């Protein structure tokens, strides 16, 4: 909401406060100022005020009110005129091309001088012809043979609006020679209105806040109207079918209006607020809405009367019927639903209540009598309607926040007043008011103990009363002993009642909190001292699930993998890239978004691996090797119940095993065993005794895929992806991946683990190589060696796998480095030889192995 | 004989002085102190000497032998030293060549940043409480004092889940904030002792979702960290004191804060907390959009309706809550202009965080 400070100043005297101080007061009270645009008033001298400012100040000496006394043609240019202009001191001849001066050209001395904004030589203003806002300083020049050193200004040149079609005409009573800054210098505050501050969507609301914050008087407008002619009450009838949707509806009538442009100052104000000036009647509704906060709607009364063929005009409000249509005044035919509320007459719908008027009964240049509507609407309904028809309007902006029905009366009277002022019409006596559902005024009791409890400070009730009354609350005085609570505490309660401008104050303990916010705002958040928590430290519970997850994260980062975090939103076809072409598609259920931002982000992922692979693909060109992991949830729908969100771990490896260095250009590619090594190290760091078994998975190479098992519990699959899957992600080199169930891993984490003592005695080192069948898994050989070696075999490390003709077809040699050591004493060669021969015997007997010579 | 010994010594020492390499030295050793060296042959010729001469010659021969051996040792050491010097002088590396790269892993910057925030909060007694991301409309909105069609719903553009449910109150949503965790925590803890529920001091981190187009300035998903304190003596002053302390830990002891009134449906009074811009020190710069202040978090006293919905009697308990956007802080701290970098996972971006 944009409001000029000059307007606010009419309701509370803040002329002495710098504009940025006003902005600071409002911002601290919850009315955040997004931007201050200066149009004439001096800009702040220092720039540490904390606000975004724009615009220009008008130099008092160089920008003044002036009058044009005659408009003559330029001797050498058709499109230019020469004005005889008086600036309060001297008469000048000023060159201009403003089209709105053409009508006055060549008339000689004008009967009524035109009041304009005059920029003297050396004045700094915006360049009216430039794109955007570019400052320029007026310099003396010759234009087509005529001396030019000053000019009459457009709104754009003064920073009031974008308008540069013609010059500004001021009202006739503008005093020539007065500095323009004094006459109409302004600054526009752009204010964010929070959802609970419907009462402040107006100049009056902001002025009330400023009055309360500064302790100054609020000058409320008066609503005494002079009326004449036949009373409205006999001419119209009002029917409200559903008071919940329409708690109040009021009508007023003004006759013999003369549709014309509004006074210059009204148009200027509207434009400063970002609203287009239309004519004196429509402008009055908008002006009043900005001023008082009540949106109004003007009907052409003669159109309505004609529709009833001279009978009584019956205005009714009701929900729209399915299939009903209405052409709104923007010319769009709207398909209505029962969510929309209509203002109708006997012939049908007239307007979309609280949102936009209909085209037929719109005020036009030929309107004579205006029927003015001021009403209260159910804010939920307005919200639904404005959203449904994508019609955010100034009216729906206010109504959808909950405007108090009491405002209808103030708005109606103020608007009739302005219409009469600007259009010369006569207000008919009698206002028609149907008010079936007045809101109950909220009333709560505030005790000093409530303030202490919520804010931690002591404020005397006298001061509370003073603060709340400034916001127009009613406070019963003196305070009484409280209705509830401990009557022996000596506490007294102040009974406060919310003013009939706000619907945001609740009852009971909620109302107390609502009022507490008002007390804190006016007291000033900055004035409440900072304190340390005095409450006891609550039970410390920790978060083992997150701590364990973080252990996995840390382990993988230590192992040289980079963590990634990807979008949870994806598309099923993106996840199907995990399967080779032609593989059967599993019919996975997805958590599906009802309002996705894009088709490729329409479901929540079922696979973290698919997300990680997409990132690998994206990074493939950046790095020679990739080692990525992601930990995160997947989402499994459960029908009407909330989905499951189990966490998974995905790892992706690709490219060179060793980063290239300047002296070692090793091109070895990462393979299955690199990935397995990482997983083994991870499991070791988590103290999990994991076993590995060959596995089949459609995403993986059939011969290069394994499952990790904890006992019989599968933790995940890993291996080299199927080459066609790798290709799906743009890789033609081995792409390694792991897809693990993090919940299963974390569930298995041991609570603790013992640390073995380390032996001080010397080891006996020995290598053995055995020849076994190719098909025999190596881990069986190692397991048997370890089992047989028992406690005295400290370690057995496979250091070579060899295949060759000399071994025979279908055979391989496995060579192990064995370390024998006892924790109790020095082993002898004889001890070692004994273990060795037992190992060899069992290998020969149980695995058909042969010792390699 | 003694004369001969003097000559032997003199000749040997002279030849030793001329030696400049290990091979020549070894040859000298064999020739001058070896078994068949002149001095050693003197010992073998002792039998031919007279009884009187024998001790004199023996003593002198011994002297010469020891002297030559000592001279040899000295020479050997000198040669080794010279050789070492030479080799050290020749082994000069170009230390400007780059080191061999390692494959270094790392945590995502969002994880690093989240941990930093949670670690500070943990030291202040805030325990981490995590909860689900797909929520019911009830938990995400209604129990937080945001009934259907409440104007506050427009503050949070929401992703809805297609469950086929037609009743809006039954809808599932992607949580728009971690606040539903406040209700879940309060309900869990109050169930432990409904008559006298335990005090609460928790941090609620996690991914939240907003229906936005993805641009340099807006994202569909981002982390949030909320804090919730509930007890019997919690005041707005405590809120200010606790958050000011948090900010001083997060942004430095000198960090200045400012509280201004705001609105959130689940807190009242509500506030925005601004921190004096740490880039320009409050003078105004591009980062703070010339305001000198950075909006860092929203906060307020827990709304009585929310306490009630969590099983805490608002007549007995008060509390405060706050919420912040870690990624926003990350961007401010590292002057990251485009939020899409965060989930873009370009390694050239991620690796800069180490
Ligand atoms: Zn700054």
Image (cartoon, coloured by chain):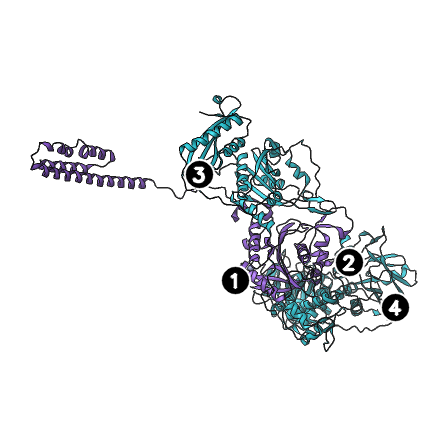
Reading the chain from its start, which is encountered first: label 2 or label 4? 4
Residue A154 spot, x, y in % from top left: 67, 62
Question: Do discs 3 and 2 belong to a common subunit?
Answer: yes
Residue B81 location, x and y as percent? 27, 41
Q: Dot 4 lies on which element? A: helix
Give the SS element for disc 1. Answer: loop
Q: CA distance from mark 4 to mark 1?
A: 69 Å
- Precedes in sequence: disc 3 or disc 2: 2
SS state under label 3: loop
Quadrant housing residue A315: bottom right
The residue carrying pointer 1 sits among few (fewer than 14), some (14 to 19) or many (20 or more) residues within 10 Å by Cα, namely: few
Of A469 and A185, which appears nearest the observer? Answer: A469
Instruction: Mark 3 vs mark 1: give the one in front.
Output: 3
Q: CA distance from mark 3 to mark 2?
A: 81 Å
Residue A232 - label: 4
Q: Which mark is residue A822?
A: 3
The reply to whether residue A457 is visible in this rendering is yes
Give the SS element for disc 2.
Answer: helix
Name the residue that disc number 2 marks.
A380
> Which chain is disc 1 placed on?
B
Q: Is residue A614 above or below residue A703?
A: below
| Closer mark to the observer between disc 4 and disc 3 | 3
Residue where numbered disc 1 is placed: B253
Distance from label 2 to label 4 (Cα)? 31 Å
Mark 4 and mark 3: Cα distance apart in space: 112 Å
Q: Is residue A35 above or below residue A575?
A: below
Residue A749 percent coordinates (x, y):
58, 45
Some atom of ligand 1 lies within 8 Å of the CB belonging to the residue at label 1: no
Q: Is A396 rendered above or below residue A233?
A: above
């Amino acid at each position: 909401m944009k409001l000029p400070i000059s307007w606010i100043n009419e309701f509370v005297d803040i002329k002495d406060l710098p504009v940025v101080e006003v902005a600071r007061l409002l911002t601290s009270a919850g009315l955040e100022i997004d931007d201050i645009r200066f149009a004439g008033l001096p800009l702040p001298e220092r720039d540490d005020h904390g606000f975004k400012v724009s615009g220009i100040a008008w130099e008092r000496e160089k920008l003044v009110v002036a009058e044009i006394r005659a408009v003559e043609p330029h001797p050498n240019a058709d499109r230019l005129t020469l004005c005889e202009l008086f600036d309060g001191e001297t008469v000048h001849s000023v060159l201009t091309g403003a089209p709105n001066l053409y009508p006055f050209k060549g008339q000689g001395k004008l009967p009524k001088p035109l009041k304009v904004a005059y920029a003297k030589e050396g004045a700094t203003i915006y360049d009216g012809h430039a794109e955007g806002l570019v400052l320029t300083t007026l310099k003396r020049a010759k234009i087509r043979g005529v001396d030019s050193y000053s000019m009459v200004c457009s709104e754009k040149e003064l920073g009031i609006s974008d308008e540069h079609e013609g010059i500004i005409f001021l009202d006739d009573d503008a005093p020539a020679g007065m500095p323009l800054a004094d006459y109409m210098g302004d600054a526009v505050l752009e204010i964010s209105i929070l959802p609970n501050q419907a009462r402040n969507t107006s100049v009056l609301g902001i002025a009330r806040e400023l009055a309360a914050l500064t302790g100054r008087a609020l000058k409320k407008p008066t609503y005494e109207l002079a009326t004449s002619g036949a009373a409205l009450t006999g001419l119209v009838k009002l029917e409200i079918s559903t008071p919940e949707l329409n708690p109040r509806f009021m009508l007023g009538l003004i006759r013999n209006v003369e549709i014309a442009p509004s006074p210059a100052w009204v148009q200027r104000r509207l434009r400063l607020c970002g609203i287009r000036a239309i004519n004196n009647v429509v402008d009055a509704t908008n002006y009043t809405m900005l001023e008082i906060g009540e949106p109004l709607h003007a009907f052409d009364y003669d159109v309505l009367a004609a529709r009833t063929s001279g009978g009584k005009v019956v205005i009714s409000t009701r929900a729209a019927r399915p299939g009903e249509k209405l052409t709104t005044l923007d010319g769009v035919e709207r398909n209505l639903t029962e969510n929309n509320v209509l203002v109708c007459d006997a012939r049908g719908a007239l307007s979309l209540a609280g949102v936009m008027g209909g085209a037929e009964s719109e005020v036009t240049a030929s309107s004579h009598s205006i029927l003015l509507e001021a009403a209260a609407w159910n804010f939920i309904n307005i919200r639904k309607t404005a959203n449904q028809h994508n019609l955010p309007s100034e009216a729906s902006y206010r109504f959808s926040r909950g405007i108090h029905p009491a405002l209808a009366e103030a708005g109606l009277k103020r608007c009739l007043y302005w219409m009469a002022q600007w259009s010369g019409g006569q207000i008919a006596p009698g206002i028609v008011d149907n008010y079936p559902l007045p809101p109950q005024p909220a009333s709560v009791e505030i005790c000093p103990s409530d303030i202490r409890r919520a804010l931690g400070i002591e404020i005397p009730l006298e001061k509370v009363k003073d603060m709340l009354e400034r916001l127009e609350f009613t406070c019963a005085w003196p305070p009484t002993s409280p209705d509830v609570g401990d009557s022996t505490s000596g506490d007294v309660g102040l009974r406060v009642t919310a003013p009939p401008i706000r619907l945001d104050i609740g009852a009971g303990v909620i109302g107390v909190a609502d009022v507490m916010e008002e007390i804190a705002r006016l007291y000033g958040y900055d004035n409440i001292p900072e304190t340390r928590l005095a409450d006891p430290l609550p039970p410390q519970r920790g978060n083992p699930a997150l701590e364990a997850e973080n252990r996995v994260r840390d382990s993988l980062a230590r192992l040289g993998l980079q963590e990634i975090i990807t979008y949870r939103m994806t598309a099923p076809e993106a996840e199907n890239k995990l399967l080779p072409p032609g593989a059967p598609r599993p019919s996975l259920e997805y958590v599906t978004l009802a309002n996705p931002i894009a088709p490729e982000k329409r479901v929540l992922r079922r696979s973290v691996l698919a997300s990680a692979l997409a990132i690998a693909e994206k990074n493939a060109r950046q790095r020679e090797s990739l080692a990525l992991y992601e930990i995160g949830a997947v989402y499994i729908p459960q029908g009407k119940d909330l989905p499951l969100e189990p966490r998974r771990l995905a790892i992706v490896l690709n490219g060179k095993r060793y980063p290239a260095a300047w002296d070692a250009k090793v091109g070895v590619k990462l393979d299955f065993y690199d990935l397995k090594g990482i997983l083994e190290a991870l499991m070791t760091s988590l103290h999990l005794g994991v076993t590995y078994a060959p596995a089949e998975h459609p995403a993986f190479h059939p011969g290069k895929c394994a499952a990790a098992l904890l006992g019989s519990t599968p933790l995940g699959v890993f291996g080299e992806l199927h080459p066609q899957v790798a290709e799906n992600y743009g890789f033609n080199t081995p792409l390694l991946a792991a897809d693990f169930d993090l919940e299963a891993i974390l569930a298995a984490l041991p609570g603790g683990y013992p640390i073995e003592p380390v032996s001080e005695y010397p080891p006996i080192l020995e290598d053995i190589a055995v020849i076994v069948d190719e098909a025999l898994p190596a881990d069986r050989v190692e397991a048997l060696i370890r089992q047989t070696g028992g406690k005295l075999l400290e370690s057995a490390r496979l250091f070579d796998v060899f295949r060759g003709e000399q071994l025979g077809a279908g055979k391989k040699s496995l060579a192990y480095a064995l370390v024998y050591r006892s924790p109790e004493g020095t082993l002898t060669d004889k001890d070692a030889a004994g273990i060795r021969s037992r190992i060899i015997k069992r290998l020969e007997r149980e695995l058909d192995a042969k010792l390699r010579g | 004989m003694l004369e001969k010994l003097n000559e032997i010594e003199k000749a040997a020492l002279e030849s030793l002085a001329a030696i400049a390499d290990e091979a020549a030295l070894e040859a000298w050793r064999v020739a001058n102190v070896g078994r068949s060296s002149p001095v050693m042959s003197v010992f073998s010729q002792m039998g031919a000497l007279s009884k009187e001469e024998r001790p004199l010659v023996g003593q002198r021969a011994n002297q010469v032998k020891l002297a030559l051996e000592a001279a040899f040792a000295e020479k050997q050491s000198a040669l080794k030293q010279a050789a070492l010097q030479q080799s050290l002088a020749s082994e000069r590396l170009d230390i400007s060549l780059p080191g061999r790269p390692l494959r270094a892993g790392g945590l995502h910057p969002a994880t690093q940043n989240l941990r930093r925030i949670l670690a500070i909060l943990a030291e202040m007694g805030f325990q981490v409480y995590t909860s689900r991301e797909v929520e019911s409309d009830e938990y995400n909105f209604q129990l937080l004092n945001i009934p259907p069609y409440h104007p506050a719903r427009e503050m949070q553009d929401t992703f809805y889940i297609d469950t086929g449910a037609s009743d809006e109150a039954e809808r599932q949503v992607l949580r728009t904030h971690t606040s539903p965790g406040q209700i879940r925590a309060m309900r869990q803890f109050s169930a432990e002792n409904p008559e006298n529920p335990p005090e609460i001091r928790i941090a609620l981190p996690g991914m939240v979702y907003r229906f936005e187009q993805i641009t340099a300035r807006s994202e569909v998903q981002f982390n949030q960290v909320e804090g919730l304190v509930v007890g019997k003596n919690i005041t707005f002053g405590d809120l200010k004191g606790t958050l000011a302390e948090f900010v001083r830990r997060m942004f430095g002891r000198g960090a200045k804060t400012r509280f201004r009134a705001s609105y959130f449906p689940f807190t009242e009074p509500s506030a925005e907390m601004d921190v004096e811009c740490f880039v320009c020190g409050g003078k105004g710069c591009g980062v703070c959009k010339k305001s000198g202040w950075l909006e860092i978090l929203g906060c307020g006293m827990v709304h009585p309706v929310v306490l009630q919905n969590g099983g805490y009697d608002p007549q007995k308990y008060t509390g405060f809550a706050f919420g912040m956007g870690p990624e926003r802080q990350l961007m401010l701290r590292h002057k990251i202009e485009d939020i899409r970098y965060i989930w873009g996972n370009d390694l050239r971006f991620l690796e800069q965080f180490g």
